[in-house]
């Protein structure tokens, strides 16, 4: 979210903070029934249960944006997630549809670790070092401007589900990859495809320099120095503790975790992969999950025939995702009902066009 959007952010009216949960739920149900197909509420898996239960569709960030794009009836799409997800939904939906984020403060620390100014400074330096041998890829957890930069340079977006396929595609186009903004997903994916750590460099956007100890001609992957603030909190000590206290427990983590954590776990994969693995696991099996706490708690309650715990018992939910709550959801719906929607997400047409190129390059592979 840029400075202009921050300044436009409206403050939740005091009256919503004073309502009981039951009153807010009652009003939300009334508006949902009144607006019918004109309203489409999307809920990310990391959302609080109080919000998640009102979603018309749930999923990960790209799934939800694709659902938004497939729904041609809804005039208003209320995205209960974070800013970059709502941007992607706006890019993929029609000009007649309006995308609303209930709280404009719901951002993503990872996406904020790569801004367009830093990227445009980095690119000519990397070009001078490596020539025209680099293709950029960006995780969908990035701003529309970063997606547009990648689209402009003939790259693609990736998800944690399809990162291997997209990285393989990128290597068929160029000798090297610039992977934004999550270094851990980039490192774990490339390593799984056989790229040794010794051929991976890091781009430090703060120092504006390449960090690599060796002959730069050996570099195959340039990892942007960004990370997920939630997934980086899972550690080898957490794994050692689980192995000691629960010797029969399987450990499954998200590939946004550090390389050491992924390598010492039993399984690693996307949110969808984690959910499906737990669902298909035999009754009585034991699982320690390294991902966001709201999702882990939901899996614990949904699968009481299995022993499911968080890999890090002191983990907290994604704080920015959790800015979306009942008061903000109700406020956004009531403003839509009044015909004066607030917190609309609008991506500039030029940015959207280039970003869609990056998205389309990925979607053509899946």
Image (tube, rainbow, N blue to C red):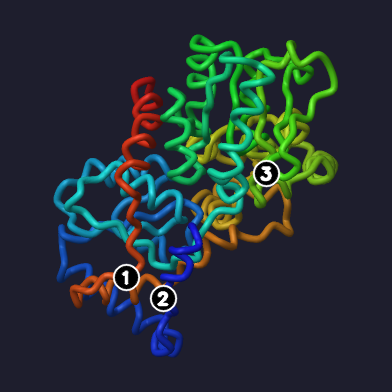
Vertically, is 221 above or below 350? above
Secondary structure under the numbered disc 3 in the rendered image: strand
As measured in the structure, the alpha-carbon distance from the residue carrying label 1 to the one carrying label 2 is 8 Å
> Which residue occupies the foreground of this view, 201 or 271?
201
Label 2 near label 1: C-beta < 8 Å?
A: yes
Please tell me whether residue 130 is drawn above or below residue 303 in the rendered image: above
Q: Earlier in the sequence, mark 1 or mark 2?
A: 2
- Name which residue lies at 45% across and 43% down: 145
Single out the mark in the foreground, 1 or 3: 1
Q: CA distance from mark 2 to mark 3?
A: 40 Å
Q: Secondary structure at mark 1?
A: loop
Image quarter where the C terminus lies is: top left
Which of disc 3 and disc 1 is earlier in sequence?
Answer: 3
Instruction: Compute the Cα span from label 1 to label 3.
Output: 40 Å
Q: Residue at x 38, y 24 (%)?
A: 361
- Residue 342 is labelled as 1
Q: Secondary structure at mark 2?
A: loop
Along the viewing direction, whichever of 247 and 91 lies nearer the viewer: 91
The residue that mark 3 highlights is 288
In this rendering, would 118 be left or right of 144? right
Earlier-in-chain disc, 2 versus 3: 2
**CB under 8 Å between discs 1 and 3:** no
Image coordinates for residue 134, horizontal then vertical, percent: 57, 19
């Amino acid at each position: 979210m840029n400075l202009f959007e921050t300044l436009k952010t409206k403050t939740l009216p005091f009256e919503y903070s004073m309502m009981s949960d039951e009153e807010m739920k009652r009003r939300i149900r009334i508006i949902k029934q009144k607006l019918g197909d004109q309203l489409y509420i999307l809920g990310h898996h990391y959302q609080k249960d109080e919000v998640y239960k009102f979603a018309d569709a749930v999923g990960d960030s790209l799934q939800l944006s694709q659902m938004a794009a497939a729904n041609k009836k809804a005039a208003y799409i209320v995205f209960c997630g974070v800013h970059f997800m709502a941007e992607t939904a706006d890019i993929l939906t029609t000009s007649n549809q309006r995308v609303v984020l209930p709280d404009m403060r719901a951002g993503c620390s990872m996406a904020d670790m790569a801004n367009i100014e830093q990227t445009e400074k980095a690119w000519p330096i990397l070009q001078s070092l490596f020539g025209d041998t680099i293709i950029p890829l960006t995780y969908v957890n990035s701003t529309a401007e970063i997606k547009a930069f990648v689209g402009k340079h003939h790259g693609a977006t990736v998800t944690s589900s399809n990162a291997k396929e997209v990285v393989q595609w990128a290597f068929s186009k160029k000798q090297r990859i610039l992977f934004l903004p999550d270094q851990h997903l980039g490192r774990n994916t490339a390593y799984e495809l056989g790229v040794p750590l010794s051929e991976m460099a890091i781009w430090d956007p703060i120092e504006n320099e390449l960090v690599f100890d060796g002959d730069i001609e050996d570099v195959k992957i340039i990892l942007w120095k960004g990370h997920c603030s939630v997934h980086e909190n899972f550690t080898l000590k957490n794994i050692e503790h689980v192995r000691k206290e629960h010797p029969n427990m399987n450990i499954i983590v998200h590939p946004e975790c550090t390389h050491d954590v992924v390598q010492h776990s039993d399984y690693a994969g996307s949110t969808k992969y984690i959910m499906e693995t737990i669902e298909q696991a035999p009754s009585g099996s034991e699982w320690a999950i390294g991902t966001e706490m709201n999702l882990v708690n939901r899996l614990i309650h949904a699968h009481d025939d299995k022993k499911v715990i968080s890999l890090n018992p002191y983990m907290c939910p994604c704080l920015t995702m959790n800015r979306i709550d009942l008061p903000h959801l109700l406020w956004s719906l009531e403003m839509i009902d009044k015909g004066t929607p607030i917190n609309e997400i609008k991506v500039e047409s030029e940015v959207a066009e280039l970003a869609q190129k990056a998205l389309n390059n990925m979607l053509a592979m899946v």
